[in-house]
Amino acid sequence: MTGADPGARWRGLYASEKGARRVLRDNGGVTGIATLVLGPPVPPALAGRGDVVLIDTPGGEALALCVGANIVAQGVAGLEFHPISAAKAAWKI
């Protein structure tokens, strides 16, 4: 859509979950990678529709989307909705 590939710098650097965790660790975790791609985070209270937010999940930190007063995230069995208060950080899109 934009011609940019935000994941290009990490493509081919891992082939396993252990390798992916190493890449995450070496790049500041989910927050570090999101900041590299999306710019500096803002307080979650400033998140609006379509903005990216950081949440805690049973499997660790994950990115999700703000859809107004809620957040939608990929869960094990499909999409999961959470209150915006679950966001730890946000990135304006």
Image: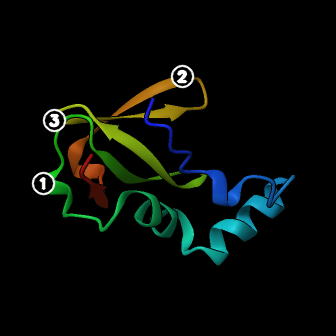
| Side (left or right) of 13 relative to 59 | right
Percent from the top left, x then y, of residue 89?
30, 61
User: Does residue 91 appear left or right of residue 57 in this picture?
Assistant: left
Give left or right: position of 21 versus 31.
right
In the foreground, 44 or 8? 8
Q: Which residue is mark 2?
A: 78
Which of the 4 image quarters holds residue 54? bottom left
Q: Nearer the viewer, mark 1 or mark 3?
A: 1
Q: Quadrant of the N terminus?
A: top left
Badge 2 crowding class, 10 Å Cα cut-off, few under 14, some 14 to 19, many 20 or more, is few
Most extreme residue toward the right, as rendered?
15
Q: Is residue 65 above or below residue 60?
A: above
Q: Which residue reaches farthest top?
A: 78
Residue designated by label 1: 46
| Element marked by disc 2 | strand
Mark earlier in primary sequence (2, 1): 1
Q: State which tag comes first along the sequence, 1 or 3.
A: 1
User: Which residue is painted at 21% across and 64% down in the image?
Assistant: 42
Amino acid, disc 2: Gly
Residue 68 lies, in percent from the top left, at 16, 33
- For image coordinates 86% across by 53% down, the residue present is 16
Viewer-nearest residue: 70 or 90: 90
Residue sitting farthest toward the front: 3
What is the quadrant of residue 84 in the picture? top left
Q: CA distance from mark 2 to mark 1?
A: 26 Å
Name the residue that disc number 3 marks: 69
Residue 46 image position (x, y, % from top left): 12, 54
Mark 2 or 3 closer to N-term?
3
Relative to the observer, which residue lies in front, 14 or 62?
A: 14
What secondary structure is marked by label 3?
loop
What type is the residue that disc 3 sits on? Ala
The correct choice, above or below, for 24 with respect to 58 in the image is below
